[in-house]
Image: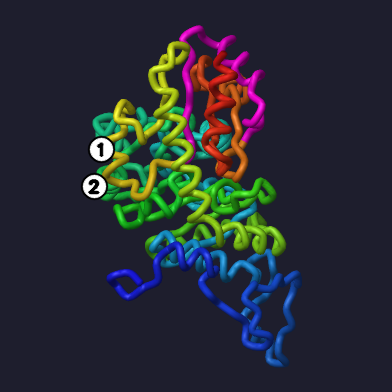
Amino acid sequence: MTGRGELHPETLAAQGLGRVTEKHREIVSPIHVATTYERAADGSFPGGRIYSRADNPTYDTPEALIAALEHARAALLFSSGQAAAGAVFQALAPGDAALAPRNMYWAFRKWLLEFAAPRGLRLELYENASLDDLAKKARSLKPRVIWVETPANPTWDVTDIAAAAALAREAGGVLAVDNTVGTPMLTRPIDLGAAIVMHSATKYLNGHSDVVAGALATAADDEAWQRIRYVRGAGGAVLGPFEAWLLLRGMRTLHVRVAAACANAMAIAQRLEGHERLSHVLYPGLASHPGHAVAVRQMHGGFGGMLSLRFREGEQAAKDFTARLRVFKRATSLGSVESLAEHRASVEGPGTTCPTDLVRLSVGIEHADDLIGDLLQALG
């Protein structure tokens, strides 16, 4: 038990909140596949549901668990992380302003620039981890939303969440944080002043490379949150009941998976730092990382399972390295039990802000010696 008399997050996750149904007392939540629900004779809905495009009973436990882990008032599941992140901005009014980091998950950055901005969002980009640049632009633009991704893909820049939240409040807006890489096992943005937390639940929350899902959690069940809920239902960005069930299954091992990935990533970073073929090993857990001091303050229990390697010989050396990997799989995505590697700039394509000499690693839960051995043999 914690000092507040509440269960630890590890226990909440492992037991899926510990809920059981009344009739059969099963410890695994059932799947509800119905799309529609019967009205009473007076036209009311005694079961509390209307139609599954708006909601589904299978969402209840995973949404409640995400809210509990994030210390949030409520949470919503979405069909993908992209849909969850987009809903935050779709809930704004045309002409509202927003700030987002220059380096972030490339597909969402592309959506903001090529879809949201041409349709009325006044968008500016700020330099990652630079509070001075963020403060200057926030005071000038007065954004309704400041978006933070920390640690930020793929260089793992670390932004001070509490300081960014204070700037958002000063500007009359709110802070929304992509906590996909941090996970609630390491970072709780709402405790640091954020209003909204986003997860690409495909990644660490599910953790098995078999579900595409997204989630939002909120510090307040207010009018803005109800607009986001409306965006989900009206736009149909809902998760299937089986996928919601799989997501809950994955979250029950979240704490052990994240701990193992953090330990492996730290071992890899420490072993490869200073390697003659690498110009940088980018990992917030290393004292050499520019964001290390902030990461120590706001990440607890580890520094995540993501790191990147930059090669002294440039782009071709990075590509050749990935071709020689045997244990790491050459694939896109992150946060699952298996370790993945990719030459990120090639994946992102034209317009990428990723250095061309960079290889991104998503470290899984395999034995650290096997992973380090694979990386060393690929380095030659």
Asked whether disc 1 touches disc 2, contact meaning CB atoms under 8 Å apart, the reply is yes
Q: Which residue is painted at 51% across and 20% down in the image?
A: 358
Q: Is residue 171 visible?
A: no
Say which of 327 and 144 sits in front: 327
- Residue 296: name its quadrant: top left
In the image, residue 38 lies at what x, y percent? 74, 83
Which amino acid is tagged 1? Arg
Give the residue displayed 50% in from the left and 22% down from the top.
354
Q: Quadrant of the N terminus?
A: bottom left
Residue at 61% from the left image edge and 67% from the top image edge: 59
Residue 246 in the image: state x and y as whole percent: 66, 59
Residue at the top extreme of this rendering: 313
Range shown magenta: 305-332
Q: Secondary structure at mark 1?
A: helix
Residue 66 at least partly seen: yes
Q: Earlier in the sequence, mark 1 or mark 2?
A: 1
Secondary structure, mark 2, is helix
- Reading the image, the residue beneath label 1 is 139
Q: Is residue 40 above or below residue 321?
A: below
Does the magenta portion include 244? Answer: no
Mark 1 Cα within 10 Å, few/some/many (few <14, many 20+)?
A: some
Q: Is residue 3 above or below residue 91?
A: below
| Residue located at (49% from left, 14% from top) | 311
